[in-house]
Image: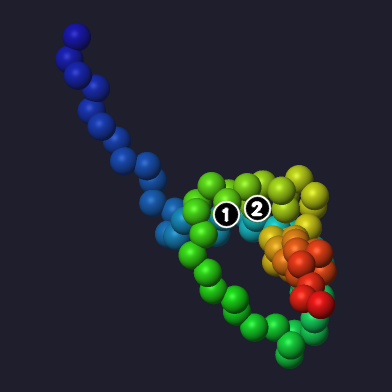
Amino acid sequence: MPPRERQRPKASGALVPHPEPLMPATAPAPEPATAGPADLVYLSARVPKALRAALQHQAIHEGRSVAKLLADAVNAYLETHKRT
């Protein structure tokens, strides 16, 4: 049996379509942690990958942003470890 000839798909003249968005356009924007947008700053720290992964999984489980979960956790820690 002779090999089949390869055939190219017909040219459509169009580029590849855009992928579907991950979030619907009507989804509300995430709320800032506990401050207004003008009061937010970046807090940078190196942490183990396992801790970051646990934080992300917990945020997904609770249905809220990582920033909100982290801000609440740090506030709770500071509240329990206040200097007197």
Report the number of discs.
2
Q: Is residue 19 above or below residue 32?
A: above
- Evaluate if marks 2 and 1 touch, with contact meaning CB atoms under 8 Å apart: yes
For the point 19% across and 9% down, the residue is: 1
- Judge from the rendering whether residue 13 lies leftward or rightward of residue 84; answer left or right: left
Q: Position of residue 34 (x, y in %)?
A: 81, 75
The disc placed on residue 40 is: none
Q: Pick out the residue farthest to the top.
A: 1
Front in this rendered view, residue 29 or 53: 53
List the single residue furthest toward the front: 84
Q: Secondary structure at mark 2?
A: helix
Coordinates of residue 48 in the picture (x, y in percent)? 50, 54
Task: Tell me the residue that label 2 is attached to.
Answer: 55
Q: Nearer the viewer, residue 53 or 2?
A: 53
Three-letter code, disc 2: Leu
Residue 16 screen position, x and y as percent? 47, 56
- Asked if residue 30 lies left or right of residue 53, the reply is right
**Which element carries disc 1, helix, strand or loop?**
helix
Q: Residue at x 79, y 72 (%)?
A: 82
Q: In which quadrant of the rendered view does residue 9 lie?
A: top left
Under mark 1, the amino acid is Arg
The reply to whether residue 72 is visible in this rendering is: no
Q: Looking at the picture, does residue 29 appear above or below residue 47?
A: below
Labelled disc at residue 52: 1
Q: Quadrant of the C terminus?
A: bottom right
Q: Position of residue 5 (x, y in %)?
A: 23, 28
